[in-house]
Image (cartoon, rainbow, N blue to C red):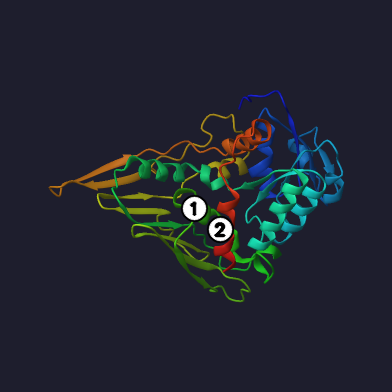
Amino acid sequence: MSTNSNKIITAGLLAYGMSGKVFHAPFLHTHNGFNLKAVVERSNKNAVNDYPQITSYNSVDELLNDLEIELVVVNTPNNLHYEHAKAALQSGKHILVEKPFTATSAQAKELFELADEVGKQIFFYQNRRWDSDFASVKKVLASGKLGKLNEMHLRYDRYRNTIGPKVFKEKAIEAAGLLYDLGPHLLDQVISVFGKPLSYHKILGKNRKGTEVDDYFTIQLSYPDSVNVFVTSSMLVVNPQAAFVLHGVYGSFIKQRADIQEEQLLAGMKLTDDGYGIEPKGKDGLLTTIDDDGNKTETVIPSEIGSYLPLFDAVYQSLTNDKPYPVTRENVITQLEILES
């Protein structure tokens, strides 16, 4: 992606697990406005295999003490986001923080104040706004073909009936459990379209044998004009349901979760390769509308191409050209207030 400025932002990653390798490094490396200089790897030094020029630090402190680094990606475990974001801001760095931003809205507000004090920017990594499937949903909503919306369902399901090895997801500690893992994705998508709800009702469940944390949640969000939105996630769904179901006065739209970017990047695909971000055939959404005479029309809605590169470009444009970043502080406070309630 070309830049409107000659400025290069030097960036560092606080971890190089799946998140660093898949969701951050390829985009910082590909975008012309960033120089991915360093990563923190406490034990296995894997980043050099993908980026031969990269510096691999042994600790977060070492990376934060690198004076060349201007932007730090906080992609450490959920319960460490607040601590590491605070340390990065105090080190004079801008920060891009993985979801959930923090465990509580109070922590978030403290970091906002700190960022303003030190004159640095906070960016929120809510990449699912740029998924191909969600882009299709927004396109249908914007078309007006559904008429007044009655209800919208968003699901993000998996099947993992055993307790996973990641302590920060499975132990009863701050920001653990499925709600804090996938809730930020679903809630941010809703908030990006509808804003802050008038009210909401949340249900949590613990279904796997021996689980210490929630592995099911559903949240009903009420919006003006009788619009009801439901977000649901479960770790025990063998046969996944449609991820997006919308019903309006004039019709319905059904769409599978089909964004392919994570799968492609895990397989080693480059952002510049042909086919990147293009959903597999047969995953298109189906729009069914009805006219005043009761005649139904079914229309296949081809998916947009998915790419998380615009998120990184939005960070770059904010840092170099003062353009507003699309995920706002208000969005994140709304999300966290629901998560922590």
Q: Is residue 220 left or right of residue 62?
A: left
Above or below, 187 against 297 in this view is below
Mark 2: amino acid: Gln
In the depicted structure, whether residue 29 falls above or below residue 114: above
Specify whether 248 is left or right of 52: left
Q: Is residue 129 visible?
A: yes
In the rendered image, the residue lying farthest to the front is 117
Q: Residue 77, can we see it?
A: no
Q: Tags 1 and 2 in contact by the CB under 8 Å rule?
A: yes
Viewer-closest of 44 and 113: 113
- At mark 1, the secondary structure is helix
Residue density around tag 2, few if under 14, some if 14–19, many if 20 or more, within 10 Å? many
Residue drawn at (45%, 40%), measured in percent from left and top? Answer: 280
Amino acid beneath label 1: Ile
Q: Disc 1 to disc 2, how far (Cα)?
A: 8 Å
- Point out the residue furthest to the bottom here: 210
Q: Is residue 203 above or below residue 153?
A: below
User: Residue 264: horizontal and vertical position, in percent?
Assistant: 57, 40
> For mark 1, does the 10 Å Cα neighbourhood hold few (<14), some (14 to 19), or many (20 or more) residues?
some
Q: Nearer the viewer, residue 109 or 158?
A: 109
Indicate the quadrant containing the C terminus: top left, top right, bottom left or bottom right: bottom right
**For marks 1 and 2 on the same chain, the one whose residue lies earlier in the sequence:** 1
Q: Nearer the viewer, residue 4 or 137?
A: 4
Q: Is residue 135 above or below residue 173?
A: above
Judged from the image, the secondary structure of the residue bearing numbered disc 2 is helix
What residue did someone put label 2 on? Answer: 335
Q: Picture quarter containing residue 337?
A: bottom right
Q: Position of residue 136 (x, y in %)?
A: 41, 42
In the picture, which quadrant includes the N terminus?
top right
Q: Residue at x 67, y 57 (%)?
A: 109
Which numbered dot is residue 191?
A: 1
> Is residue 260 rendered to the left or right of residue 70?
left
